[in-house]
Amino acid sequence: MAILKHLPSIMENDSGSLKARFDALDNMIKVMMDITRCVVEFKDLPTSYISQEVPALSTAMAHIPAAVYWTLRSVVACAAQITAITTMGHEFSISTTDVWELSILADKPRNILKHLRKQIGCLLRIHR
């Protein structure tokens, strides 16, 4: 955290390239948190009311391992980006491909999240 607190001085000298990277990191972290919340929602569903044979639940449960995989992969990518930013200091230079890679990497978990939310919506309608 102490290293990250020095970033304002680094960003003062930046022409905006770090902002793009921080925006990409912020978006990826939000998607990871949303996927985590969604998976917890599935685990908290009342099993006495919703059977494993319900298609929406079985479909969602089949996608949870992929959601976990992509979330962990995203955590590693974010950690690598944060490490790169904090270790380079004032000499830091960013390529647009770094931001592009983060954005592309976030697409897969974002799509899984949309699918899981759709399935949980179906399950909640069944439960009511």
Image (tube, helix red, strand yellow):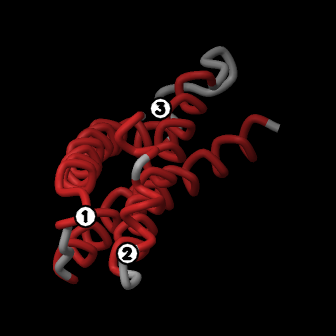
Where is residue 60 drawn, in percent x and y? 44, 43
User: Which x, y percent locates residue 7?
Assistant: 40, 55
Mark 1 Cα within 10 Å, few/some/many (few <14, many 20+)? some
Q: Earlier in the sequence, mark 2 or mark 3?
A: 2
Give the answer, above or below, for where 38 lies relative to 85: above
**Residue 68 left/right relative to 59:** left
Q: How crowded is the residue under tag 2: few (<14 C-alpha within 10 Å), some, or many (20+)?
A: few
Quadrant the C terminus occupies: top right
Q: In the orientation shown, which residue stands out farthest toward the right?
A: 128
Q: Secondary structure at mark 3?
A: loop
Q: Which label number is shown at residue 47?
A: none
Image quarter for residue 46? top right
Q: Looking at the picture, tell me which residue is in the foreground, 44 or 98.
A: 98
Amino acid carrying mark 3 in the image: Glu
In the picture, the quarter occupied by the N terminus is top left
Label 3 and label 1: CA atoms lie apart by 56 Å
Q: Is residue 73 visible?
A: no
Check disc 1 and report its element: helix, strand or loop. helix
Q: Are marks 2 and 3 in contact (CB under 8 Å)?
A: no
The kind of secondary structure element at disc 2 is loop
Spatial CA distance of label 2 from label 3 is 57 Å
Residue drawn at the location 50% of the way across and 61% of the way down: 114
The residue labelled by disc 2 is: 13
Type of amino acid at the residue the image marks with label 2: Asn
In this view, the mark in front (2 or 3): 2
Determine which residue is flagged by label 3.
53
Residue 90: mark: 1
Q: Nearer the viewer, mark 3 or mark 1?
A: 1
Relative to 17, residue 38 above or below: above
N-terminal of the two: label 3 or label 1?
A: 3
CA neighbours of label 3 inside 10 A, class few (<14), some (14 to 19), many (20+): few
